[in-house]
Amino acid sequence: MAYNETLADRVRARLSGRTDSSERKMFGGLCFMINGNMCCGVSQEDLMLRVGPECEAAALALPDARPCDFTGRPMTGMVFIGPAGQATDEELDNGLALALAFVSALPPK
């Protein structure tokens, strides 16, 4: 299993009411796109959030957050949230809110 399907289903449920969302297999996991822009994803057991440079510090303050570094070096504006930081619906929603706020401000692709 390349990604946690239960976590993917939880994210999918939160985005299901949006007409501008889609899914794409990327980075060895599953990414969720908003208007063609990568918003968040699931990689193994982690939630990956694209929050932008301005909100990166706030995202890193979330429980079980760490820099997104699957390429071997940190990716600016992206964070991983480990299982302990996305266990509850409130924790998942808090992380997704940061990603959705950033990506919703981007022009559609």
Image (cartoon, rainbow, N blue to C red):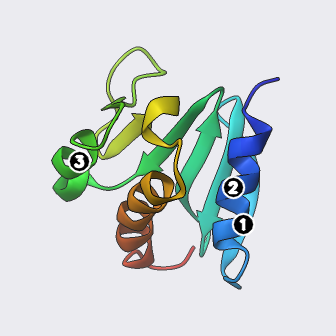
Q: Against 23, is 34 above or below?
A: below
Quadrant the N terminus occupies: top right
Mark 3: secondary structure: helix
Return the residue at label 2.
10
Instruction: Give the class, few, some or many, for how many residues have Cα within 10 Å of label 2's Cα (few <14, many ≥20).
Output: some
Left or right: residue 26 versus residue 60 is: right
Q: Is 93 placed above or below 71 here?
A: below
Name the residue tied to disc 1: 13
Can residue 82 be seen at all in this image of the molecule?
A: no
Residue picked out by circle 3: 56
Q: How many marks?
A: 3
- Asked whether residue 102 is in view, the answer is yes
Mark 2 and mark 3: Cα distance apart in space: 23 Å
Residue 51 location in percent, x, y?
A: 34, 55
Instruction: Name the mark nearer the viewer: 2 or 3.
Output: 2
Residue at (52% x, 31% y) in the render: 83
